């Protein structure tokens, strides 16, 4: 179709840019796989009065709905609070039947077209449950929650919030301090010497490799990390690092928001590694 335009945004969808990114569009299709993004998409749609064409998959089961607060319930009406992070399995751990995302994605596309064309009966106030194991579909009726925090007559949420904090991800997770998402250079060196299976991700720029590098580390600059998540395995232990720790902390939060729960960042970056572990490396 020559009339289709694809706009690519090489940045994660966050509270800081969500309004700007979504502004030109009539609706949003939520094809995310993490709770912070789902709640963010919902709140953007409620605040801008746009429909949220929702889809999710897990193992052999999928869900599809249209959350449109102007005409029915929103996502928060059905799921007021996210589950505890420790109860959310990563995709590599929970698994998804390979063809199921195609089925759910096609259903989402169908809902989007009906909304744009003003035809048919969109899944507003309905949750379609697909079971690939039995080959069956079930429809559940949904009602608007009169006490919903975002779409009720007296909403508590009137602007976008910190959704990683709301969902209890790095730096905010109940019972876990931000220091527990860090690893000191000496501790990391000990883990490497002990043969612990780790994957090192260098989020610096290519020219910085000419100054210093860690053997075996994979270079994925922070600016391209969001578009290269498919290269990583959420079942692996990941350690991200940069020059001094600032960029690696941003990368860690991005990864955690994308469903990577086994991720830490090197405290102080490669410069701290040079000072504490390998003095042969230059500090810059």
Image (spheres, rainbow, N blue to C red):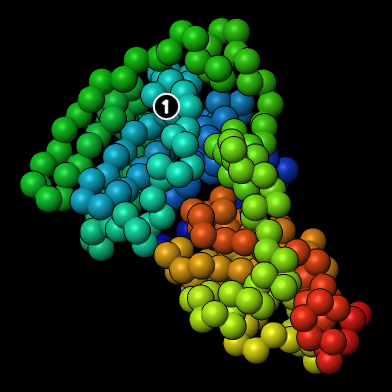
Residue at the image position 46 percent from the left and 68 percent from the top: 236
In the picture, measured across the screen, residue 104 lies left or right of residue 12, that is: left
Left or right, 282 with reference to 217: right
| In this view, 122 is above or below 274 | above
Q: Can you name the residue that lies furthest to the right here?
A: 284
Q: Does residue 103 appear left or right of residue 113 in this picture?
A: left
Q: Quick one: label 1, few (<14), some, or many (20+) residues within 10 Å?
A: few
Residue 92 figure quarter: bottom left
Compare residues 3 and 53 and report the one nearer the observer.
53
Q: Which residue does the image show at 42% across and 27% down from the upper left? A: 79
Q: Quadrant of the N terminus?
A: bottom left
| Quadrant holding the C terminus | bottom right
Task: Tell me the quarter of the picture where residue 16 sits.
Answer: top right
Q: What residue would you read off at disc 1?
A: 79
Q: Nearer the viewer, residue 64 or 87?
A: 87
Which residue is drawn at the image coordinates 80% and 92% (left, top)?
210
Q: Position of residue 179 (x, y in %)?
A: 70, 52
How many numbered discs?
A: 1
Q: Is residue 105 above or below residue 128?
A: below
Q: Is residue 8 something one can see in this rendering?
A: no
Measured as percent of width and height from the top left, residue 279 is found at 84, 87
């Amino acid at each position: 179709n020559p009339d289709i335009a694809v706009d690519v945004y090489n940045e994660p969808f966050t509270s800081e840019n969500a309004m700007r990114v979504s502004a030109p569009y009539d609706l949003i299709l939520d094809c995310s796989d993490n709770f912070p993004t789902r709640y963010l998409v919902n709140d953007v749609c409620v605040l801008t009065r746009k429909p949220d064409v929702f889809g999710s998959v897990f193992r052999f089961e999928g869900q599809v709905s249209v959350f449109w607060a102007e005409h029915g319930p929103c996502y928060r009406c059905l799921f007021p609070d996210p589950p505890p992070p420790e109860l959310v399995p990563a995709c590599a751990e929970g698994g998804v039947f390979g063809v199921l995302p195609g089925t759910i994605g096609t259903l989402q596309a169908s809902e989007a077209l009906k909304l744009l064309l003003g035809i048919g009966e969109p899944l507003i106030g309905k949750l379609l449950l697909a079971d690939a194991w039995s080959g069956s579909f079930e429809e559940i009726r949904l009602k608007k929650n009169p006490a919903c925090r975002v779409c009720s007559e007296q909403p508590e949420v009137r602007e976008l919030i910190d959704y990683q904090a709301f969902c209890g991800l790095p730096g905010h997770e109940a019972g876990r301090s931000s220091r527990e998402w860090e690893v000191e250079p000496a501790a990391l060196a000990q883990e490497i010497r002990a043969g612990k299976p780790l994957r090192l991700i260098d989020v610096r720029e290519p020219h910085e490799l000419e100054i210093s590098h860690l053997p075996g580390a994979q270079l994925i600059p922070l600016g391209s990390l969001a578009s290269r998540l498919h290269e990583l395995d959420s079942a692996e232990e990941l350690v991200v690092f940069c020059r001094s720790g600032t960029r690696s902390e941003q990368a860690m939060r991005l990864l955690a928001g994308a469903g990577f729960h086994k991720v830490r960042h090197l405290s102080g970056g490669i410069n701290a590694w040079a000072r504490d572990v390998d003095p042969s490396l230059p500090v810059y």
